[in-house]
């Protein structure tokens, strides 16, 4: 039957010819949407959370903006070596023209002779071209190196965000796993409590047996409530490192077993490749920039060569005296000039040497940092390998302990139902089983974090 048939008038058959009103359809759509909105949050796996963080984390967005800035910086540097055109216009009027007495030139009288016009209108069009400059060459090269540096900074930021999301996701997952174990044990105890009450009413069990089970049940319920509140705090921390608003709701779709199966063991014998660590590569890019600074300040003697062309189609007027007939006439007096200039630094007081020595110190500092980082990465890998070996052994041991605790619990239950066991024995066996389950979950969590630690140390992306 069509889902809308229940909304039709009683007794009227629904068929294709029945006209469904738009308002009725709107009510159904709103009801469906409200049902979905009132449900749980979006289910997200670890890979989903990492992908979300790559798209929304502010640090990654800033790093991407820095890449765009570096691209424009390259264009800005290139533009310095391209032809430069400019245009302008100027007008000047002499309120009082300079001149010399006529007698100074051997003419009779003291009349002032002026050789400049009252008016001058001077448009101009100029062209400048940089032919050679070592500073320009290295600046352009440096801007390209800087682009590589910020690209590597993005890789470093992504690696940090990925690690932070993983470090926040796994504890939230551990709490969820523990809550699942507690809920399962609560269900078992509730069933046992019901059976014990029935036996007590029949006179085959003491009230003390009922009280012991109720106490264990209340303890587990309290612990489950505490874990639920802890989980909310941890999930909010996860959303924060993802770049997600904390008001949004999410559910964790992974579990430890899935992740242990999906994330293959890292190769314990893999060689350490420092180039797999983005922070190491970024350090090398920073050294390249410092080395360029050394080269720049080591060749300050190299010349700079520039060429220029300038054209001025000028107009001038107001020659002679105001009483002259041609005083108001304007004359077109164009001019053009072309030239080349060569600048060679000779002595700057020693500032270039000081800059060069400082740049060399910068390179030497990075070399020391590089060796320190190599040593730290090597130690990190070795420690991660040992942690992974220990975690593997712990999982195997805890799995055996859980199997043993499960057998003890099953046997104790059978004895209790047969009337040859006490409630103390079964609550003790239940507690041992619960502890064994928790220890196995913790061991699996430790194994997963150990795998992740080795992946980080080796610089892997998976």
Image: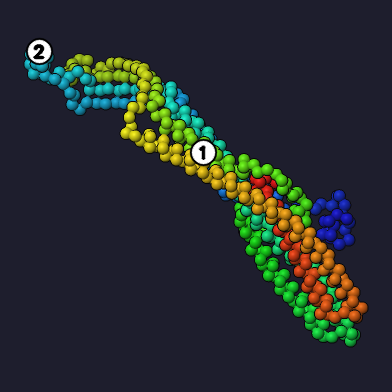
Question: Which residue, as the protein is rendered here, is positioned at the far left?
Answer: 109
Rendered position, 151 above or below 434: above
- Disc 1 to disc 2: CB gap under 8 Å: no
Could you say where residue 53 lies in the image, as x and y percent from the top left?
63, 50
Rendered position, 266 above or below 434: above
63 displayed left or right of 269:
left
Q: Is residue 292 visible?
A: yes
For the residue labelled by badge 2, is the local secondary structure a helix, a strand or a loop? loop
Q: What residue is at 86 percent from the left and 74 percent from the top?
A: 412
Q: What residue is at 52 percent from the left and 41 percent from the top?
A: 367
Where on the picture, by quarter, is residue 189? bottom right
Could you say where residue 71 lies in the image, as x and y percent from the top left?
53, 35
Q: What residue is at 76 percent from the left and 53 percent from the top?
A: 260
Q: What residue is at 71 percent from the left and 58 percent from the top?
A: 446
Rendered position, 329 above or below 273: above
Residue 106: which numbered mark, if any? Answer: 2
Residue 287: which numbered mark, if any? Answer: 1
Could you say where residue 373 lies in the image, as x and y percent from the top left?
57, 46
Q: Say which of marks 1 and 2 sits in front.
A: 1
Q: Quadrant of the N terminus?
A: bottom right
For the residue labelled by badge 1, is the local secondary structure a helix, a strand or a loop? helix
| Mark 2 crowd level (few <14, some 14–19, many ≥20, 10 Å Cα) | few
Front position in the image: 1 or 110: 110
339 displayed left or right of 243:
left
Front position in the image: 260 or 104: 260
Where on the picture, by quarter, is residue 218? bottom right
Mark-to-mark CA distance, 1 and 2: 74 Å
Could you say where residue 244 lies in the image, as x and y percent from the top left?
62, 54
Residue 393: which numbered mark, if any? Answer: none
């Amino acid at each position: 039957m069509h889902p809308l048939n229940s909304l039709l008038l009683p007794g009227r058959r629904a068929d294709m010819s029945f006209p469904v009103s738009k308002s009725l359809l709107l009510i159904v759509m709103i009801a469906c949407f409200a049902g979905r909105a009132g449900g749980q949050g979006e289910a997200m796996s670890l890979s989903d959370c990492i992908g979300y963080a790559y798209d929304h984390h502010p640090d990654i967005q800033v790093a991407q903006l820095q890449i765009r800035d570096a691209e424009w910086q390259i264009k800005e540097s290139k533009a310095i070596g391209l032809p430069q055109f400019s245009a302008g216009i100027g007008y000047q009027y002499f309120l009082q023209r300079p001149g010399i007495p006529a007698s100074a030139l051997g003419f009779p009288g003291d009349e002032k002779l002026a050789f400049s016009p009252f008016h001058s209108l001077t448009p101009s069009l100029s062209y400048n071209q940089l032919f050679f400059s070592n500073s320009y060459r290295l600046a352009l090269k440096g801007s390209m190196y800087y682009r590589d540096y910020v690209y590597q900074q993005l890789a470093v930021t992504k690696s940090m965000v990925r690690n932070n999301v993983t470090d926040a996701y796994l504890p939230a997952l551990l709490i969820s796993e523990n809550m699942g174990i507690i809920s399962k044990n609560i269900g078992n105890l509730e069933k046992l409590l019901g059976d014990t009450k029935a036996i007590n009413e029949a006179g085959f069990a003491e009230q003390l047996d009922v009280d012991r089970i109720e106490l264990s049940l209340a303890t587990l319920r309290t612990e489950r409530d505490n874990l639920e509140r802890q989980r909310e705090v941890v999930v909010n921390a996860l959303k924060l490192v993802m770049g997600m608003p904390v008001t949004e709701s999410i559910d964790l779709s992974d579990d430890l077993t899935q992740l242990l199966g999906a994330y293959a063991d890292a190769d314990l014998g893999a060689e350490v490749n420092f180039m797999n660590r983005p922070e190491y590569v970024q350090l090398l890019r920073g050294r390249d920039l410092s080395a360029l600074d050394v080269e720049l300040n080591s060749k300050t003697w190299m010349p700079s060569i520039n060429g220029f062309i300038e054209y001025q189609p000028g107009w001038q007027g107001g020659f002679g005296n105001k009483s002259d007939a041609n005083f108001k006439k304007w004359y077109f007096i164009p001019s053009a000039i072309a030239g080349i200039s060569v600048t060679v630094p000779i002595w700057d007081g020693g500032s270039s040497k000081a800059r060069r020595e400082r740049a060399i110190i910068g390179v030497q500092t990075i070399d020391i940092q590089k060796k320190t980082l190599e040593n730290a990465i090597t130690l990190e890998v070795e420690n991660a390998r040992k942690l992974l070996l220990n975690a593997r052994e712990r999982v195997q041991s805890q799995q055996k302990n859980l199997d043993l605790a499960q057998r003890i619990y099953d046997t104790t239950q059978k004895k209790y139902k047969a009337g040859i066991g006490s409630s103390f024995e079964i609550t003790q066996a239940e507690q041992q089983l619960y502890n064994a389950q928790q220890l196995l979950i913790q061991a699996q969590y430790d194994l997963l974090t150990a795998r992740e630690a080795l992946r980080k140390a080796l610089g892997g992306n998976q």
